[in-house]
Image (tube, grey):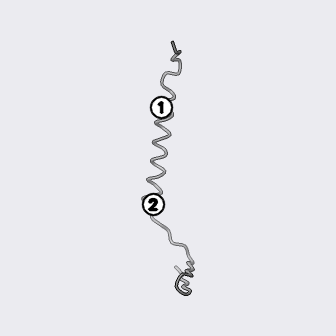
Amino acid sequence: MANNSGGGKGLYLIVGGLVVAVAVLAYFLFAPNEQPDLAIDLSDGIKIETN
């Protein structure tokens, strides 16, 4: 038989890691996008926009 001396600590570690990963992904998904002070676009001609 397996010795269950861990008491489920591995399960708590996995669940805690998943909670942290979901929180970080939600922060990056819903955080307001900050536009840079200077944006240079070279696709159709040259556009330089300042904030």
Residue under numbered circle 1:
12
Residue under numbered circle 2:
31
Residue 14 is situated, as x and y percent measured from the top left of the image, at 49, 35
Q: Which amino acid type is shown beneath numbered disc 1? A: Tyr
Q: What residue is rendered at 42% in x and 59% in y?
A: 30
Q: Secondary structure at mark 2?
A: loop
Q: Secondary structure at mark 1?
A: helix
Q: What residue is rendered at 48% in x and 57% in y?
A: 28
Vertical position of residue 38 compared to residue 31: above or below: below
Q: Which amino acid type is shown beneath numbered disc 2? A: Ala
Q: What residue is rendered at 51% in x and 12% in y?
A: 1
Vertical position of residue 5 compared to residue 43: above or below: above
Callout 1 environment at 10 Å: few (<14), some (14 to 19), or many (20+)? few
Outermost residue toward the bottom? 45
Residue 5 is situated, as x and y percent measured from the top left of the image, at 53, 17
Q: What residue is rendered at 52% in x and 15% in y?
A: 2
Q: Earlier in the sequence, mark 1 or mark 2?
A: 1
Residue 31 is situated, as x and y percent measured from the top left of the image, at 45, 60
The number of discs equals 2
State how far apart marks 1 and 2 are (Cα): 28 Å
Q: Are marks 1 and 2 in contact (CB under 8 Å)?
A: no
Vertical position of residue 6 compared to residue 37: above or below: above
